Amino acid sequence: MLYGHGADPVHVLLPGHDTMMALKHSNALLTIEWDGKSELAIAKDVQRDAVKRTIDHVDLLIVKKGEKIAVDVPVHVTGEPVSGNVAVQEHVSLHVEAEATHLPESLEVSVEGLDEGAHVTAGQVALPKGVTLLTDADAIVVAVSATRGAAAEDEAAEADAAEAAE
């Protein structure tokens, strides 16, 4: 279904394979042509068959060039924290506002070299030019903590050091 900008909702039939391939990309901008008209749209909701994972229905929001819209953008964590630590992703996406024709496909957060207790907030994530963060800037996106094995090794090493000191 295609809707937006005060127009009546329109039911359109889209080619299955092409639609599936386009929707593999987050916030993909689609050009929908019907009845001699052409509209830009993004997928707002995708319903899939639970077993086959084929697309059953797509809600498409009409957008215009230059218009700013709010979307969720996936966050990808890159790099490795200091050895013995693990990065825990608290938010898999961030809510942002951007021009409809320049929506970011994803955002990257590096945890390279971060030590236990370090974290990256939404406000620290680098955003492309023209993109505004709508998620709370203090929201923790990624937190770094020690693995259980590393914490146990540290406790054992401290105990050994204390015993040796006696």
Image (cartoon, rainbow, N blue to C red):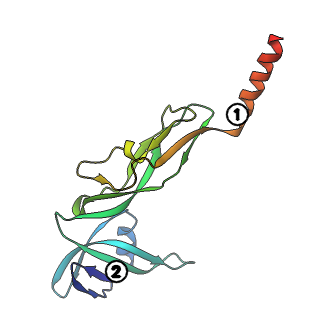
Q: Position of residue 7 (x, y in %)?
A: 21, 84
Which quarter of the picture shows residue 71? bottom left
Q: Earlier in the sequence, mark 2 or mark 1?
A: 2
* Point 31% across, 55% down: residue: 104
**Disc 2 to disc 1, how far (Cα)?**
53 Å
What's the residue type where badge 2 is placed?
A: Pro
Q: Position of residue 92 (x, y in %)?
A: 48, 55
What's the residue type where badge 1 is placed?
A: Ala
Answer few, some or many: residues within 10 Å of disc 1's Cα (few below 14, many 20 plus, some between 14 and 19): some
The residue tagged 1 is 151
Asked if 128 appears above or below 66 in the picture, the reply is above
Q: Position of residue 157 (x, y in %)?
A: 75, 23
* Point 26% across, 73% down: residue: 41
Of the pair 55 and 18, the residue shown nearer to us: 55
Q: How many marks?
A: 2
Of the pair 91 and 79, the residue shown nearer to us: 91
The residue tagged 2 is 15
Name the side, left or right, on which 125 lies relative to 29.
Answer: right
Asked if 71 appears above or below 32 in the picture, the reply is above
Q: Secondary structure at mark 2?
A: loop
Name the side, left or right, on which 68 lies relative to 163.
Answer: left
Q: Position of residue 110 (x, y in %)?
A: 44, 40
Which quarter of the picture shows residue 103? bottom left
Q: Which mark is residue 2?
A: none
Of the pair 109 and 55, the residue shown nearer to us: 109
Figure quadrant of the N terminus: bottom left
* Point 18% across, 78% down: residue: 38
Asked if 35 appears above or below 106 in the picture, the reply is below
Which mark lies nearer to you, 2 or 1?
Answer: 1
Asked if 160 appears above or below 95 in the picture, the reply is above
